Image (cartoon, grey):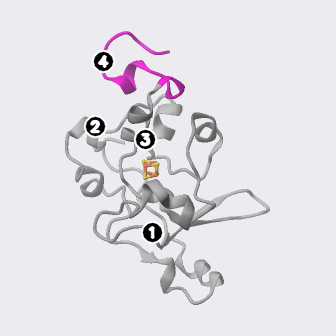
Amino acid sequence: MPSSGGAFWQRKRLDEMSPAEWEALCDGCGRCCVHKLEDEDSGEYFETRVACRLLEPGTYLCSDYANRHAHVPDCVTLTPELVASSQWLPVTCAYRRLAEGRGLAWWHPLVSGDPATVHSAGVSIQNHTISEDQLSDPDELLDHVIAWGDSPSGA
Ligand code: SF4
């Protein structure tokens, strides 16, 4: 239940946030920008270290966020409804954390005041990815399944 005091992410539900507030919630971890594989039988998701070709090395941000759908038509636009039903989002994702009532973690730039803390906390894709352009066959994704750190101290 939203409260009357505190920062916007503490007093507003996801579906009450302005577009600017919504965008500010992304912690820049980049984990929604790596390819995932789904086990058709169990429904379980596996993350790979293969990143979208638009992901910018160094910043781990989309290199053309405003026009990303022109390059990657199936890039997902997160909405409150989608967050509530998206098991592929990492448990560290700020949207998922708020949807599950867990608040923002200490490493979130809105909390720490430093965009680098998402990397120093070990929850981002920093130094772990290769670009999808480096694959010669989509089946090679299977060779790049990786387990990211989901439970840094303070999670
Ligand atoms: S997983 Fe969530 S917090 Fe991380 S980059 Fe994607 S939307 Fe932002």
Label 1 element class: loop
User: Residue 54 bears which disc, if any?
Assistant: 1
Mark earlier in primary sequence (2, 4): 4
Ligand 1 closer than 8 Å to label 3 CB: yes
Q: Which residue is mark 4?
A: 6
Given the image, on which type of amino acid does mark 1 rest?
Leu
Instruction: Look at the numbered disc 2 and give the secondary structure of its residue.
Output: helix
Q: Which mark is residue 110?
A: 2
Residue at the spot 39% in from the left edge and 35% down from the top edge: 20
Q: CA distance from mark 3 to mark 2?
A: 10 Å
Left or right of 141 in this view: 134: left
Give the amino acid at mark 3: Ala
* CB atoms of marks 2 and 4 within 8 Å: no
Q: Position of residue 21 (x, y in %)?
A: 39, 32
> Which circle's residue, 1 or 2, is located before the other in the chain?
1
Mark 4 or 1, nearer chain start:
4
